[in-house]
Every structure is written in C-alpha cells, then in structure tokens.
C-alpha cells in the first residue's frame, strides 16, 4: 500500500508538468500564428502600395521638368482641336515597343477624343526600313491618310513581321504613283531628320517617348496605367495647356 501511495505522489507532479508544457506550447503556437497573420497583412499592404505607386502619374514622369516638344505645324495629329491634354509622341516604326504602344494611343484617341490631342513625331533609327516606314507615313499624309498608313504599318509588322509600304498604299486607296514618287524622292526626309534632332535635344534615349502636357514619359506604358496618367492631367488644372 505504501508503494502504491508513493507512485501516486510521483505521478501527480508529473501530470502538472505535462500540463504546463502543453499550455506553453499552445501559447507559443498562438503567438506564432498572430505574428504570421500580422506579417501577411504587412506584406500585402506593402505590395498594394507598390502596385498603386506604379499607377501614379508621377511614377512615370522622368522628372518634374516641363518640355516644349510640340514641334512644327506640319506634324500630323489626331484628336481634339481644343485639347485639355496634349500628347507629343516620338516613335520609330521598327521599334517593337512602339508597335505595342500605338494600340494604347488608339484607345486613348477613341475614349478621350474630345479632350486629348496626339501629335506624332519621328525618332527614326538609321536603318533603311525604319526610314522607309517614316517616309511612307509622311507621304500618305499628302493624301490625308497619315494615321491609316501609320496604324497599318504597325499592324502588318505585328501580324506578318514586315510591312510592304507599296502594298499597304494600294490597300488603303492611295494614289500609288504619287505615293511612289514621294518615297523615291525622299521628299520628307528633312522633316524626319528635324524630328530626330529635336528628340536628341529633348534627351530622348529610346522609343516610344511621350510628352504629356510637356512632361516626359518614356517607354511602353500599359493602357490601364496610361489612362490614369491622362486622367491625372485632365483633373489637375495646374497641368493643363
């Protein structure tokens, strides 16, 4: 009987010890779970801030400097005659990023046609194909078909990898003989060169580069983000022309 009581005395503190450890482990687990939950909320919050920052107008601006990039009256344009927002875009027809960006410009013109004016300028690389594309667009402008040639050149390159400007001219209904003579004479080469020189003075290092109410924005910006930049300038009277 004494042995039994002795064993029972030893088992009682042992049970208390196990219970203490169990409570400690539960407490540690709860604290860890709370820490993990807080960490997840913190990381989610930070990621959200980063993503939201990426859609702010200032995020895309190279600086606060305002440039005069409009060029001359001969530069072709689409959109409003009395714009609240003016976009001057420098592009190269052989540039793959410009091929994507032209769709953003198309959507912008469609949605904001009454408020936005888009002016097109050349920042053409020295390869012959780029120059021919730029000449083709300028020569099409003689027949009031600049934007149709502009968009078709980009579309053909995307679909087929190459745009034959003479075939395009025929497809869109140009006077092909007049168009051919204009191309062969390189009639608008001085304009193309001037745009390029002006682009260098403006510090352009690649295409596409857009100036939105004078603020320089570089690269192919996804439409949803570009739209927010447009909205910013539409709603901010200090940045209206």
Image: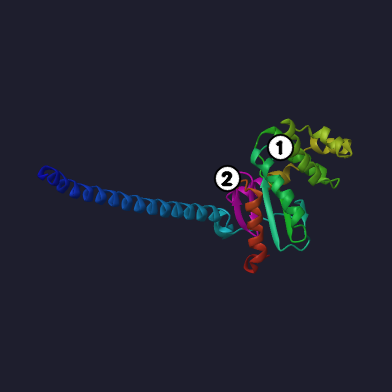
Q: What segment is highlighted magenta in the picture?
A: 196-218
Q: CA distance from mark 2 to mark 1?
A: 18 Å
Q: Left or right of 2: which side holds 175?
A: right
Point 34% across, 49% down: residue:
29
> Can you say whether 155 is above or below 235 in the image?
above
Task: Give the residue pinned by disc 1.
Answer: 131
Point 11% across, 42% down: residue:
3
Badge 1 crowding class, 10 Å Cα cut-off, few under 14, some 14 to 19, many 20 or more, is many
Does the segment drawn in magenta span residue 107? no
* Residue 188 percent across, percent down from the top left: 76, 43
* Residue 44 percent across, percent down from the top left: 48, 52
Secondary structure beneath disc 2? loop
2 vs 1, front mark: 2
Q: Left or right of 82: which side holds 19?
A: left
* Residue 11 percent across, percent down from the top left: 18, 46
Task: Give the residue pinned by disc 2.
Answer: 205
Of the image marks 2 and 1, the number of the one nearer the N terminus: 1
Give residue 178's mark.
Answer: none
The chosen color scheme is rainbow
- State the residue lying farthest toward the left: 2
Does the segment drawn in magenta span residue 199? yes
Q: Is residue 187 visible?
A: no
Q: Is residue 98 visible?
A: yes
């Amino acid at each position: 009987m004494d042995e039994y009581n002795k064993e029972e005395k030893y088992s009682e503190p042992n049970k208390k010890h196990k219970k203490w450890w169990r409570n400690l482990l539960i407490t540690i687990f709860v604290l860890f779970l709370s820490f993990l939950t807080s960490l997840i909320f913190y990381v989610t919050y930070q990621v959200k801030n980063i993503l939201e920052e990426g859609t702010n107008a200032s995020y895309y601006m190279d600086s606060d400097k305002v440039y005069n990039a409009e060029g001359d009256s001969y530069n072709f344009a689409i959109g409003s005659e009395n714009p609240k927002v003016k976009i001057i875009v420098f592009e190269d027809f052989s540039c793959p990023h410009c091929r994507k960006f032209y769709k953003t410009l198309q959507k912008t013109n469609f949605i904001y046609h009454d408020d936005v004016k888009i002016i097109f300028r050349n920042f053409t690389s020295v390869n012959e194909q780029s120059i021919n594309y730029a000449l083709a667009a300028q020569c099409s402008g003689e027949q009031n078909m600049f934007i149709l040639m502009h968009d078709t050149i980009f579309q053909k390159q995307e679909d087929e990898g190459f745009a034959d400007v003479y075939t395009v001219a025929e497809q869109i209904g140009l006077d092909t003989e007049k168009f051919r003579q204009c191309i062969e004479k390189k009639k608008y080469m001085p304009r193309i060169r001037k745009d390029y020189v002006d682009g260098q003075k403006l510090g352009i290092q690649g295409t596409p580069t857009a100036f939105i109410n004078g603020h320089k924005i570089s690269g192919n910006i996804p439409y949803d983000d570009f739209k927010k930049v447009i909205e910013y300038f539409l709603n901010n009277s200090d940045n209206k022309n």
